[in-house]
Structure formats: C-alpha cells, structure tokens
Amino acid sequence: MNFLLNIIEGAGGKALALWTGFTDFIKYIISIIRSLNSMRYLRFRSIYNITINQITFTGLDALPFIIVVALIIGATVIIQSLNSLPKFGIEGFLGNLMVIIIAREAGPLITALIVISRSGSAMAAEIATQKQNGEIRAFEIMGIDTRLYIVFPRIIASFLSLLSLIIIFNVVAFIGGYMISTYTNYIPIGTFFMALIDALTVRDLTSMLIKSLIYGIAITLICCYHGFRPKTAFEVPIFVSRAVSHTLFSIIIINAIISVLFYL
C-alpha cells in the first residue's frame, strides 16, 4: 500500500510541476505580448543591431553545416530511391519522393534541430549569463523592458534565419544531391528538375513558410524563457539543457501537427 501511495504521490508531484511550468510559460508569453505596447519607447537602432547579430550567428554561421548536411541527405535519398524504386518511370517517382521527404519534412525539421542545438542553447546561455552578471537588472533599472528588448528581436531573427536556411537546405539537397548521385546513377537533369517542379505545390511552399514562422517563435520563446529562469550560476547549465530538450520535443510535436493539418 505504501509503495502504491508513493507512486501516486510521485506522479501527482510531477503532474503539478508540469502544470505549474505550463502556466508560468503562458504568463511569460502574455507578458511579452503586453510588452509590445512599449515598442515605441525603444530605439530602432538597438533592436536592429540585436536582430542583425542574431541573424549572423543563427543564419550565416550555420550555413556551412547546413550545406554539408543537405548534400548528404539529398544524395542519400536519391541514391537509395534509385536503388529501391522500379526503374520504369523512376523520374516521376523520384520527384514526388524528394518533395515529400526533403521539402515537406526533412528540410524544415533538420534545419530547426540544427538551429536549436547551435543558437537555441547559446540564446539560453547568453540570457542566463546576463542575468547572473546583473546586466538584465541594470536594463530594468534604466526602465528598459527586458523581455521586449531581448526576446522580440530574436524572434524576428530566428524566423528570417530559419526561412532562409530551410530554402537553402532544400535547394542544396535537390541540386547537390542530384550531382552526387550522378556518379552512381544517371537521370537527365531536365527530366529530374521538371519532375521536382511538377511535384512541388503551393501547399508545400505555404507549409514551409508557416513552419519557419512557428519554429522561429517557438525556439526563441522557449529558449529565452529558460534563460530567464536560473537564480544562481549553478542552475545555468541545468536550464540551458532544459531549454534544448524542451524545444526539441516541442518542435517535433509542432512539425507533426502542421504536417497532419496540411497533408491529411
């Protein structure tokens, strides 16, 4: 009986902690939305500089890694498809398969995971360090809305960076993957890209845009939220780890929901 009570108590404690964390996160989002009223008091140059710096780190610095991963994924999908699909009418099959696997799913999701592992963790660590060093407190004393000043420019930067990186990932995966695959199998380049264009729809482009927007908002909100939470220097790595794991889980769920809404 005591064992059963301990299990129930432990489960209840975890459920209460999850609910408390969820409500706290909702309050945090509401506070950011309310902070938008203070936008007119912020200097455009300060927000611009933060946005550009975040785009440089999230987008430009991640570009080499994105290109390498896209090349590998694109070549792997094409080579495996050529070896597995029936040889007759392979071009039509391949175009649809590349759009389904890369443009719809792998491109946006893998790009988001790379951004989370690089920029999301850095974002949370940067804010946590600023809090421990008293920089955030100094902003508050000067009357600066720290949530708006810190979070809002990063949302814009994450969205623009993700959208650009997803487009680059898809293009590199299609073109680079095709070029690498020609060493093992040959498909006329015109036939290959005509099949891609025929398979790619407005729905796919809309899905890509929406995923970029939602990913950019979700990654920034969750990582910044955990960055604000540490109360001591000892807690910084704990909350940075939570920021990454919670964001990864959320993005995978969001990706599944968007795919279901668009393609079922």
Image (cartoon, grey):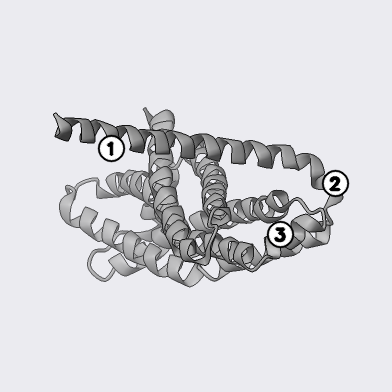
Tell me the distance, in whole angstroms, between the alpha carbons under discs 1 and 2.
48 Å
Mark 2: secondary structure: helix
- Horizontal relation, residue 247 to residue 10: left or right: right
In this figure, which residue is indicated by the disc labeled 1?
A: 10
Q: What numbered label is drawn on residue 34?
A: none
Residue 163 seen anywhere in this rendered image of the structure: yes
Q: Would residue 94 be found to the left or right of residue 111 on screen?
A: left
User: Which quarter of the rendered picture does the N terminus lie within?
Assistant: top left
Q: Amino acid at mark 3?
A: Arg
Amino acid under disc 1: Gly
User: Which numbered disc, 1 or 2, marks the residue closer to the eye?
Assistant: 1
Task: Return the x and y of residue 88 as percentages of the image width and height.
Answer: 19, 47
Q: Quadrant of the C terminus?
A: top left
**Residue 96 image-quadrant placement:** top left
Image coords of residue 61 (percent x, y): 54, 71
- Which of the two labelled residues, at mark 1 and mark 2, occupies the earlier sequence position? 1
Closest to the observer: 62 or 50? 50
Compared with 195, 53 (above or below) is below
Q: Where residue 110 appears, x then y in whole percent?
A: 40, 55
Which label number is shown at residue 137?
Answer: 3
Q: Nearer the viewer, mark 3 or mark 2?
A: 3
Circle 2 residues within 10 Å: few <14, some 14–19, many ≥20: few
**Towards the viewer: 143 or 12:** 12
* Mark 1 Cα shell of 10 Å, populated few (<14), some (14-19), many (≥20): few
Mark nearer the viewer, 3 or 1:
1
The label shown at residue 40 is 2
At horizontal 42% and vertical 54% (from top left) the residue drawn is 242
Disc 2 marks which amino acid? Arg
At horizontal 71% and vertical 59% (from top left) the residue drawn is: 137
Q: Looking at the rendering, which quadrant does residue 50 occupy? A: bottom right
